[in-house]
Every structure is written in structure tokens, then in C-alpha cells.
Image (cartoon, rainbow, N blue to C red):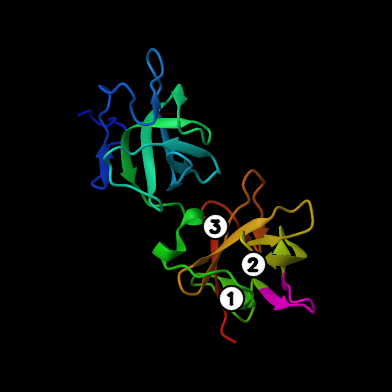
Amino acid sequence: MQQAPDDEPPGSDSALIDDRGSDTPGAGTRPAGQADLVTVKGRIAHGVECLTLKTPDGDVWSFNPGEAEFGPGDYVSIRGEVADASFCQQGKGTLIPQWIEEIDPPARDRDPARAGGLAVTSEYVQGSWVAKGLKANCAKPDFDVTPNSRGMSIIETRINGVPETGVVDVGPTPALQWDEPLPTLPIETRGPDGLAVIPAKGADSVTLAGHRIEGDGVVFVKCAD
């Protein structure tokens, strides 16, 4: 059985894959010569012919877990080679795993069924919110979300120190939407009473009510009515 890479040893929830003696390793053919190893992290889903792995950036890779006991819904890190050819025919390419390890997903890709999160709804977001922490002061909310005459949820706050009004999108991809050039900021529930505002991918960071939106985001909690 192969050893895991020294720089990223698998933990207890991992599986080493050894199929180098096979004519059809994994779900594809091995690259000619000395192949470069890659590490890809994401959530497993069913694919057309093989399992797929979707990364937080939206890339999709196909792979075959072999005898490893991982399946759809699991969030894993896969270390392996990129196949020259494959019957999977889906995604950016096909990985030939050396090892697979279950890992914790990043905040923006948590599975609500596992993390205890709640759906982002109009009822959930409407109200006054303050950044979580010892300095939280509901007498001076960081932002307010109220319904308008068309049933939309409207947010009023300050972005980069300037008063702004936007729309809280509670659809399939919840987010705070503003007029251009301000970036759309993804949102998600955190715990039973939190709302995380997450930085926009590929855009300059901004401050919301003086709080810089970066990293895993800033968590706000709703003030009591």
C-alpha cells in the first residue's frame, strides 16, 4: 500500500488507494511519464458515469473512490493524478486518487443538514442586526432589514463608510445585492440565530457598518424585537 505524502498525511477518516497494478486504475488511464500530484478539496456528488467532486470555486472533477467508503454529501480532500483519458466524461478532468480524506468544509460550503444551519428566508433576515461580539449594541444596529410594498427585503447600512440601500436576495443563492460597482455579498445562516456576510469572490473587500468582510465572513446576530 502506498504511503501518504509527507506534507499532507491523512487522518483517521481517510483511505489510501492502491491500484497501480491495474490496467484501468480508478476511472481513467494514468499519465505517461512522471505525473504531477494534485490535491483537490470539495463535496462529493453523483455524476453521469462516476462520482464527482465540486470545489468551493465551482470546479467539478470526476473520480472513482475504489473501495474507499466515501459517497455523495461527504466533503473530502483527494490527492492523486489527473488521468490522460477517462470514461467519466464530466467536469474539468478525472482524478486517479492516491488517498482520500474526509475534512471539514469551509463555512460557505457547509451542509445545513449537517451543520445545523437554517434556510435564509425573508422572515429570518428581517429585523435589526449587530456584529456578534462583546461590543454588540442593539441601540445602534449595524443594519436593518425591512419589507417593502412588493414583499422584497430591503437592507439599510453603510458600505465603506457610505450609507447604502440594497436588496437581500433569499433565493437559491442568498446574498446582499447593491447597485454597481459594489460587489454582491453572499450570506448564510450560522448557528440558530446568526447571519454570516461573506466576501465576494474575486472582488475588493468592503466594510459593512465598519466591519471588514473578509475570510470566512462576519457573523451578525438579530436584535430582539
Measured Cα–Cα span from mark 3 to mark 1: 18 Å
First along the sequence among labels 3 and 1: 1
Q: Earlier in the sequence, mark 3 or mark 2?
A: 2
148 left or right of 78 in image: right
Dot 1 falls on a residue whose secondary structure is: helix
Start-end of magenta stretch? 144-155
Residue 153, image x, y percentages? 71, 73
Q: Residues within 10 Å of mark 3 (few under 14, many from 20)?
A: many
Q: Is residue 117 visible?
A: yes
Left/right placement of residue 65 relative to residue 51 reads left
Q: What is the number of the mark on residue 124?
A: 1
Q: Which mark is residue 151?
A: none
Is 152 within the magenta?
A: yes
Task: Name the residue that disc number 3 marks.
Answer: 217
* Residue denoted by label 2: 170
Which numbered disc, 2 or 1, marks the residue closer to the eye?
2
- Does the magenta-highlighted stretch encompass residue 151? yes
- Give amino acid for label 2: Val
Dot placed on the residue nearer the N-terminal end, 2 or 1: 1
* Residue at image location 58% in from the left, 76% down from the top: 124
Kindly indicate whether the residue at mark 1 contacts the one at mark 3 (C-beta within 8 angstroms). Answer: no
Q: Quadrant of residue 63?
A: top left
Taking the spot 45% from the left edge, 39% from the top edge, the residue there is: 49
Find residue 121 and report its horizontal and vertical position in percent: 60, 72
Answer whether labels 2 and 1 touch (C-beta < 8 Å).
yes
Task: Give the foreground label among 3 and 1.
Answer: 1
The image shows residue 225 at horizontal and vertical percentages of: 60, 87
Task: Judge the density around disc 2: few (<14), some (14-19), many (≥20) Cα neighbours within 10 Å.
Answer: many
Question: What is the x, y in percent for residue 158?
Answer: 72, 65
Q: Residue furthest top?
A: 33
Q: What is the spatial separation of the Cα atoms under label 3 and label 2, in whole angstroms?
A: 18 Å
